[in-house]
Amino acid sequence: MKYRKIYECGYFRFFFRRICLNLRLFQLQSYIMAENKTVRNDGDVRDFLNSIPEVTKRKDALTILDLMEKTTGLAPEMWGTSIIGFGNYHYKYESGREGDFFLTGFSPRKQNLTVYIIPGFERYQKLMEKLGKHKTGKSCLYIKRLEDINLTILKELIRLSVDRMNRKYNL
């Protein structure tokens, strides 16, 4: 009851609304002005992959590098500190936020080899069933070892994904 009387006070309501509005504008501005952390750089892809201490993971990463290069016909580039991307596109959201990102790529993470299938996996369910042992996130394909999956299916998944992105962004 005590708090209700305070809130009903016109002066308090005015400042409360003003504070909420300013907070919301600050959050919105921070969202719009936020820089993308994963940006293309001039790091050497092969030096990065050759620095992987675990032999099997390094070998798998070099195999994926070769497979993606042949499948996409694009040169690999470093994005951020640990992602190898192929190609790029420019996106712009309705909110006004925009940036550049790779069409497809991968990252040899500690737990898994992560392959980025940017359009997601919904339209590729039949291929995913034939792929082998894996896990997925929204656009991430997590693979423990390449020997666990069918590389022909992975190659087709990458090709279809890049084709989809090229059509979507008129590349």
Image: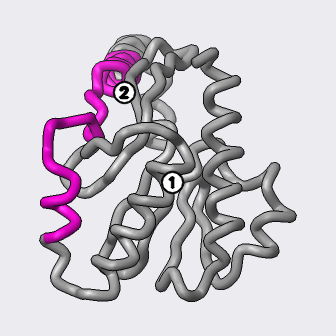
- The image quarter containing residue 160 is top right
Label 1 crowding class (10 Å Cα cut-off): few <14, some 14-19, many 20+?
A: many
Q: Which mark is residue 152?
A: none
Q: Earlier in the sequence, mark 2 or mark 1?
A: 2
Report the front residue among 102 and 65: 65
Q: Which mark is residue 116?
A: 1
Q: Is residue 140 left or right of residue 126?
A: left
Please tell me whether mark 2 sits on a helix, a strand or a loop. Answer: helix
Residue flagged by tag 1: what amino acid is it? Tyr
Q: Is residue 107 left or right of residue 169?
A: left
Note whether 112 is above or below 153 in the view shown. Answer: below
Q: Is residue 3 left or right of residue 18?
A: right
Tell me what residue is drawn at x 69 percent, y 81 percent. 132
Residue flagged by tag 2: what amino acid is it? Tyr
Question: Does the magenta run of residues contain 44?
Answer: yes
Residue bearing the label numbered 2 = 31
Q: Quadrant of the C terminus?
A: top right
Note whether 152 is above or below 11 in the view shown. Answer: below
Chief secondary structure of the magenta portion: helix
